[in-house]
């Protein structure tokens, strides 16, 4: 049975969502040099890789499992007579299609062992636009279920680019209005280019002052700036190999399926505009 009815997610355990807390502390706990935040005792651990079941305590620190064996913890849960198994990750789900709120869905599936879902919120986004995505994020906060919105994967900040085929208008993606506005203003100030912003500050940038498309600096400078931009984007949470390349094609209204334009969202396959907020 699952013990995932409690919330030991990294964001719930460490200020600012620091995943796993301090690495050195986790290592010290794993080695038994410091007490764990929580120890689950007396259970039978299911090893899904070796198909073995064996008794062991489970040590948790900073929201992460750091060790199996015998540990001392600030809090203990008695799991005698129970199996301790990894939670199931549902890698593709449309929360809207369940007809349930995230909280109600969590109430139903967490006791059965599903601890994480990866959600594509396009149905909410099609009807409510950004408000729909913001609702999903807010409604999923502080649940004993981790919900990830599929797309750029940003956990914080914003990215902006004036390389946006073929019209090359400014395109911004982000997790909050403040950083998105800061990114747009930063691109305007540098007369075009790419930027990565977090907490209102530019973390990396590449100036493209020639029509917002080309740099007036040597190749080595451009390559260095691009490398710093990709590093900054990964620190914001994206797992895309080149998020700025992805951004550049979001605005190309000749390839399927939905594209962003300065006139609205376009359904390329049906050759029509798609309402963001349920207009007729």
Image: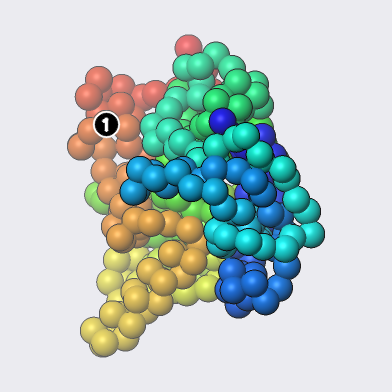
Foreground of the two, 42 or 100: 42
Residue 11 screen position, x and y as percent: 65, 53
Q: Residue at x 66, y 34 (%)?
A: 5
Q: Residue at x 72, y 43 (%)?
A: 78
Foreground of the two, 209 or 178: 178
Q: Residue at x 38, y 56 (%)?
A: 239
Horizontal side, residue 189 vs residue 165: left or right = right
Horizontal side, residue 68 vs residue 151: left or right = right
Q: Is residue 257 visible?
A: yes
Q: Is residue 132 visible?
A: no
Residue underneath mark 1: 257
Name the quadrant containing residue 10: bottom right
Q: Quick check: 150 above or below 157?
A: above
Foreground of the two, 62 or 136: 62
Name the quadrant containing residue 77: top right
Q: Which element type, helix, strand or loop, lies under badge 1?
A: loop
Name the quadrant containing residue 35: bottom right
Q: Quick check: 244 above or below 264?
A: below
Residue 79 screen position, x and y as percent: 66, 40
Foreground of the two, 193 or 38: 38
């Amino acid at each position: 049975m699952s013990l995932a009815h409690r919330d030991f997610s990294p964001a719930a355990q460490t200020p600012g969502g620091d995943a796993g807390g301090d690495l050195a502390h986790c290592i010290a706990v794993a080695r038994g040099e410091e007490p764990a935040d929580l120890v689950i005792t007396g259970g039978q651990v299911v090893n899904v890789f070796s198909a073995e079941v064996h008794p062991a305590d489970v040590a948790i620190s900073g929201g992460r499992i750091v060790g199996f064996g015998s540990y001392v913890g600030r809090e203990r849960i008695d799991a005698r007579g129970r199996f301790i198994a990894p939670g199931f990750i549902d890698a593709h789900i449309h929360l809207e299609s369940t007809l349930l709120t995230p909280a109600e869905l969590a109430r139903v599936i967490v006791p059965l062992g599903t601890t994480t879902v990866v959600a594509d919120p396009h149905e909410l986004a099609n009807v409510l636009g950004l408000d729909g995505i913001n609702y999903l994020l807010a409604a999923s906060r502080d649940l004993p279920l981790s919900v990830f919105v599929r797309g750029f994967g940003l956990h914080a900040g914003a990215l902006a680019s004036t390389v946006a085929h073929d019209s090359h208008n400014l395109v911004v993606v982000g997790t909050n209005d403040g950083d998105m506005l800061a990114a747009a203003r930063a691109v305007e100030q540098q007369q075009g280019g790419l930027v990565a912003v977090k907490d209102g500050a530019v973390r990396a940038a590449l100036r493209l002052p020639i029509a917002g498309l080309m740099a007036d600096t040597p190749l080595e400078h451009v390559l260095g700036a691009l490398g710093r931009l990709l590093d900054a984007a990964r620190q914001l949470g994206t797992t895309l190999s080149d998020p700025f390349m992805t951004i550049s094609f979001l605005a190309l209204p000749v390839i399927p399926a939905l594209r962003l334009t300065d006139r609205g969202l376009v359904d390329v396959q049906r050759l029509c505009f798609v309402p963001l907020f349920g207009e007729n």
